[in-house]
């Protein structure tokens, strides 16, 4: 439980609802390396590009380079850093990390226990995922970090730490409520689909993520099709307080399908829930715009 508690405390570095998953991303990358190649030091100069890509894809819109977490993660007791000749880390400056041929590695006792106990490793990965990212991103993140994907699917952690971090309650009926509120249609494109009596391809998308006190209620949730849910959580799509859909200028799509399903959404009005159901709260919309959406938005029309 000691290691789970230490990993969970990484989440406390966030303030005011801001996303700061960079230590978690570095740990996931290191665990992926541990699974694939065994316990070996990770050279900053050889890893910087891979971490840059990982941070850009799964971090918040405000980009942070890997030098800061590479150095500062050592303060959490899970990671060690040293120069190529065994000296202390020269700091979080990128040029000094390269010049000193700085290496990082998981703390030896931490790595040893994870290698000896696959269940613990799976729990560690699951805590890092659950306390930093929406579930729709877990499999993509495991693939990008090199973590065996079955870890994210099979690990369960009922309680991270005794008296742990405050969490908003999950509502097991939220999908049914959202489907009713949005008349079983995607709020972005209007898609509906059934097989027998089952609705398919429609999901609950949260504006403010559950890991950051986002609640399972009407003020924080939308009904989106699987495609638009994934793009919403990746920051390709967003909405503004006026109810208009925005599309990231960073998104590139050259086919007719990309235009029809993504680019042409820019400027459209989000389908509201049926009368009598609460609309998304502008505070949750603002959180998604600041912490997830990859601005600036494309010009509509």
Image: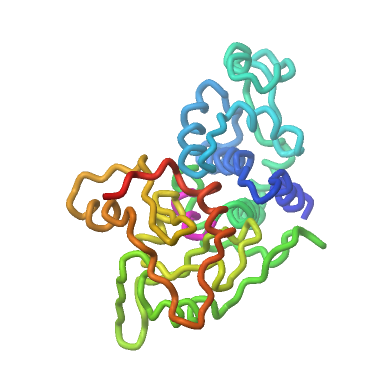
Q: Main secondary structure of the magenta part?
A: helix
Kindly identify the residue that appears in the image at 50 percent across and 83 percent down: 276
Q: 35 and 28: which one is in front?
A: 28
The reply, left or right, for residue 51 in relation to residue 259 is right
State whether residue 97 is above or below residue 156.
above
For this orientation, the residue located farthest to the front is 242
Q: 3 and 255: which one is in front?
A: 255
The part of the image, by quadrant, that contains residue 202 is: bottom left
State whether residue 301 is above or below residue 30.
below
Residue 220 % position (x, y): 55, 66
Q: Magenta part of the protein: which range?
A: 134-142
Quadrant holding the N terminus:
bottom right
The part of the image, by quadrant, that contains residue 281 is: bottom right
Asked whether residue 223 is drawn in magenta, I would say no
Residue 198 % position (x, y): 36, 83
Asked whether residue 135 is drawn in magenta, I would say yes
Residue 237 % position (x, y): 40, 53
The part of the image, by quadrant, that contains residue 86 is: top right
Residue 129 % position (x, y): 58, 53
State whether residue 51 is above or below residue 45.
below
For this orientation, the residue located farthest to the right is 163
The reply, left or right, for residue 299 in relation to residue 17 is left
Kindly identify the residue that appears in the image at 68 percent across and 27 percent down: 71
């Amino acid at each position: 439980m000691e290691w789970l508690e230490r990993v969970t405390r990484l989440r406390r570095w966030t303030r005011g609802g801001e996303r700061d998953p960079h230590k978690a991303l570095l740990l996931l990358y290191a665990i992926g390396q541990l699974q694939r190649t065994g316990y070996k030091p990770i050279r900053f100069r050889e890893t910087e590009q891979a971490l840059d890509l990982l941070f850009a894809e799964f971090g918040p819109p405000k980009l942070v380079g890997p030098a800061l977490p590479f150095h500062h993660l050592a303060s959490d007791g899970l990671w060690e850093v040293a120069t190529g000749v065994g000296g202390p880390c020269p700091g979080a400056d990128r040029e000094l990390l390269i010049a000193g041929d700085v290496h990082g590695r998981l703390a030896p006792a931490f790595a040893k226990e994870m290698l000896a106990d696959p269940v613990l490793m799976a729990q560690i990965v699951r805590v890092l995922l659950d306390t930093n990212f929406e579930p729709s991103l877990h499999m993509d993140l495991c693939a990008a970090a090199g973590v065996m994907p079955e870890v994210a699917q099979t690990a369960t952690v009922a309680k991270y730490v005794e008296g742990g971090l405050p969490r908003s309650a999950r509502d097991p009926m939220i999908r049914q409520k959202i489907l009713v509120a949005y008349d079983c249609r995607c709020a972005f494109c209007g898609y509906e689909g059934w097989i027998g009596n089952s609705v398919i391809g429609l999901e609950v998308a949260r504006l403010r993520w559950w890991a950051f006190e986002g609640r399972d209620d009407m003020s924080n949730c939308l009904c989106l099709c699987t495609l638009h849910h994934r793009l919403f959580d990746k920051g390709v799509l967003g909405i503004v307080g006026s109810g208009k859909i925005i599309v990231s200028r960073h998104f590139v799509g050259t086919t007719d399908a990309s235009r029809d399903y993504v680019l042409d959404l820019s400027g459209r009005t989000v389908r509201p829930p049926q009368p009598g159901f609460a609309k998304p709260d502008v505070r949750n919309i603002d959180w998604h715009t600041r912490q997830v959406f990859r601005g600036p938005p494309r010009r509509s029309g």
